Image (spheres, rainbow, N blue to C red):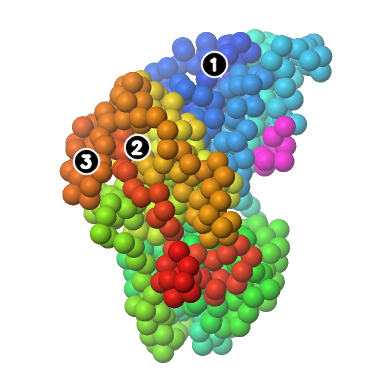
Amino acid sequence: MLLTGAEIVIECLKEQGVDTVFGYPGGTILNVYDALYKHSGEITHILTSHEQGAAHAADGYARATGRVGVCMATSGPGATNLVTGIATAYMDSVPMVAITANVNLPLLGKDSFQEVDIAGVTMPITKHSYIVKDVRILADTIRKAFEIAQSGRPGPVLVDITKDVTANTCEYEAMVPGRKVLASKYTEDDIARAVQMICKAQKPFIYLGGGAIISGACREVAEFAEKVDAPVCDTLMAKGAFDGTSERYTGMIGMHGTKASNFGVSQCDLLIALGARFSDRVIGNPKTFAKNAKVLHVDIDAAEIGKNIHADASVVGDLKQVLHEINACLKQQDHSEWMEHIMDLKEKFPLKYDDSQLSCPYVIEEIDRVTKGEAIISTDVGQHQMWAAQYYRYTQPRTFLSSGGLGTMGYGLGACIGAKMGRPDKICINIAGDGCFRMNMNELATASRYNIPIIQVVINNHVLGMVRQWQTLFYDHRYSQTVLNDKVDFCKVAEGLGCEAIRVTRKEEVAPALERAVSLGGPVLIECLIPEDDKVFPMVPAGAPISDAFDGDDLAARGQK
């Protein structure tokens, strides 16, 4: 079948089962959009307000569904506007294919209008970047892009196509995509050594990373935790990999982790890291992290073993498969005394906040109650992000979407739109601070254009909250450029962009606002006004041992505010 390059792009997307694409057209990619127009009944295209919103939407779609997210943009600034979203996906191992078009082949390298070497720009933040200059290799390149994006440790792949390639023709033959199965890198001895370490441990602690969700290993993790008879903590990326209502669950670990998790990991004699990368926000001071413990590290990426923390033993492979084998070999362990100690830590050091007034933790708990813990929650980055991780009880995987590795302000709204497109059965709520919301609030126009029923909660304290918290604690209250107390009215902005808007100033208004938002069936903004100096606790200073976690009570005891 003789097709143009643009038609081949669309046929390859259909081959891969792509049902939704997020993007923004322009001159060099017009041929692709023309072909897409002819297949609008098969592939839904969401026109975002900005290309960065398209990348974040593709990311949110991928995180919520487990499928590859797809975004498109034209050359030059269209392509470069995708970069932050691509980097966000790369840092958090999100499968994405970004398709861009470039100037005609004879114009490459001549500083032509809207010409950028986007493959070169994105090389450090993708698993692979392609530039296609020959229509005959276009189909195979797109197929390889999807294969790479979702194999092994997932991540984004960029395919840049010169405009003349999208117009040129060649024979196209449809193919049924096959999922490449990577050969296991571990041996029976690796499994045996892991089992032996677990059996010798008296005080084991399980530390879950995002790999537990990516691999689909949640059932195996639950079985493993019971067999080991160990407590479980998680990272930001692992929310929902283990039931947040389980007695074994101790909460998040790290800079804003619970004292139960941070103290417990500091006291354990075996730390079992599952699909985690020991990021600096988790480990604090690497010299003191889990200093009393041997470390067993299971991860699909061999490069992560020993990168940040020395591993006494490791198993390199898909976590679901590895845990299936370990569970089959492992006899039931009994660590009742250790578990009792951890339960005492949980009781002694619960998460708490000032409930005398409207606060973000209260809003999060009400969201949890109203949605019965079954919503998909996306966030931006900052205090609200940490509170959303602490106070919403995630019980299922792929229900918490947040930029963990890159820390991208402005991520959440696009991601929420993508999640709702991928999971229309779910209530999808984005929680943002007022500083983050300003960055990509134009995507409310995208939600209203298509009547996508997402709920945007803006936690408005009129400051850059997390930066202000650091300025309060470590910069002697010098609030340099963090006060946002201006004349912006977010409710009027939302209404102007075609959305419903509700302002909340008191605790008793939160539940009715949420219930109304859920019932309206369209995009809604809820603005919640909270005090400017609320802080996220516990907290560990950057680079300090995680056992140094402190909270408001500790500061009060030291005479600090």
Q: Disc number at residue 25?
A: 1
Is residue 531 toward the left or the right of residue 315 in the image? left
* Residue behind mark 3: 513
Q: Disc number at residue 456?
A: 2
User: x, y (%) of residue 44?
Assistant: 42, 23
Nearer to us of marks 1 and 2 is 2
Q: Which residues are magenta?
A: 121-128
Q: Is residue 185 visible?
A: no
Amino acid type, residue under disc 3 in the picture = Ala
Label 3 or label 1, whichever comes before in sequence order? 1
Q: In front here: 273 or 291?
A: 291
SS class, disc 1: loop
Give the vertical position of 266 relative to 377 (above or below): below
Residue at left offset 54%, top offset 30%: 52
Quadrant placement of the C terminus: bottom left
Report the Cα–Cα distance between label 1 and label 2.
26 Å
Residue at left offset 48%, top offset 41%: 483
Give the vertical position of 244 relative to 91 (above or below): below
Residue at left offset 42%, top offset 33%: 486
Q: Disc number at residue 17?
A: none
Is residue 196 toward the left or the right of residue 343 in the image? right
Q: In front here: 239 or 154?
A: 239
